[in-house]
Image (cartoon, rainbow, N blue to C red):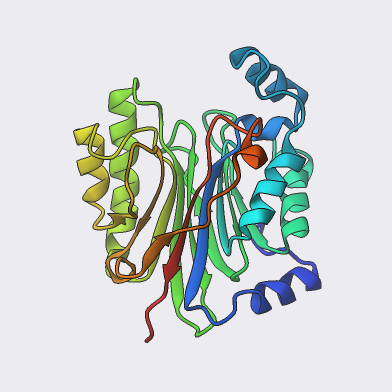
Amino acid sequence: MRYPVSAILVILCAAACVADGTKLTVMTYNVAYGAGVDPADRRIVERDTKGKYAGNRLDRVMSVVKYVNPDILGIEEACSWDKNDEAVAKQVAKELGMHYYLAKSGKSRFNVALFSKLPIVSAKGFPDEFTRAALQAELRLPDGRTLDVFVAHFNLLRSKDSQLSEIRYLAGQMRPHAFDLGVMMGDANFQYGVRKESTDALRASGFVIAPPVGKRIDQIWTSRPLTGDIKEGRQIPADLTNGTSDHRPTVMVIGIPEK
């Protein structure tokens, strides 16, 4: 299985670093073609952005993540992180002291990944249902309860039918957990409320988008029991994120209600 990180240090940190489970910092970050770790991906993003996001950006991406210090991290466009026995994903997990699960896309290079200080009890991807990728995982909270986590990267808005199909599929996976403890995060590729069909399709999951909504396409949604205690994470300095990706991270601090 891919989701446990075997190093004892990682396991100990994952158990100890989440203080009491009452507050979780959740972060989603589209790192643009795998942060340029692979030369082929690097050439594409450098061409498409006229060199704005150049070179191997992984160290800079890691600096952003370490500044936030999330308990749960969703990565979109984890391109080439699956190569060489998931070498990059393993490197990131080890450096952060987190468990991980990588969900490989069955149709493109755009994988997604989950990194967690909480133990990953189970995880699965959906390689055939998404043009990019999505995953579903169960995490173990310090008090023994389960937190259901979804990481998704929906298709582009211009591919209307495909995007709607993907949203509806994931909403169907989320719906049974709407009144459990659950979080969905990722690159939605639509603005909440602006694209009504896509908005309504994801709202049908029973999950609720974390405020403030704004125009962001990188979104975090929560199940109903988690809507009462959500706030934005601390601001990330612009000079830290400049040149790392064409997306800024979205970060929320979510309170877990007592049993």
Whether residue 200 can be seen here: yes
Whether residue 79 can be seen here: no
- In the rendered image, residue 204, in percent from the top left (x then y), is placed at 21, 50
Question: In the displayed structure, does residue 49 sit left or right of residue 146?
Answer: right
- In the rendered image, residue 227, in percent from the top left (x then y), is placed at 30, 65
- In the rendered image, residue 93, in percent from the top left (x then y), is placed at 72, 56
Looking at the image, is 10 positioned above or below residue 73? below
For the C terminus, the image quarter is: bottom left
Question: In the displayed structure, does residue 232 sit left or right of residue 240?
Answer: left
In which quarter of the view is residue 158 placed? Answer: top left
Residue for point 45% across, 31% down: 131
Residue for point 60% across, 37% down: 31
Residue for point 66% across, 24% down: 53
Question: In the displayed structure, does residue 196 sit left or right of residue 93?
Answer: left
> Which of these two is toward me, 137 or 77?
77
> Which of these two is toward me, 172 or 213?
213
- In the rendered image, residue 50, in percent from the top left (x then y), is placed at 64, 12
Question: In the displayed structure, does residue 52 sit left or right of residue 181?
Answer: right
For the N terminus, the image quarter is: bottom right
In which quarter of the view is residue 224 placed? Answer: bottom left
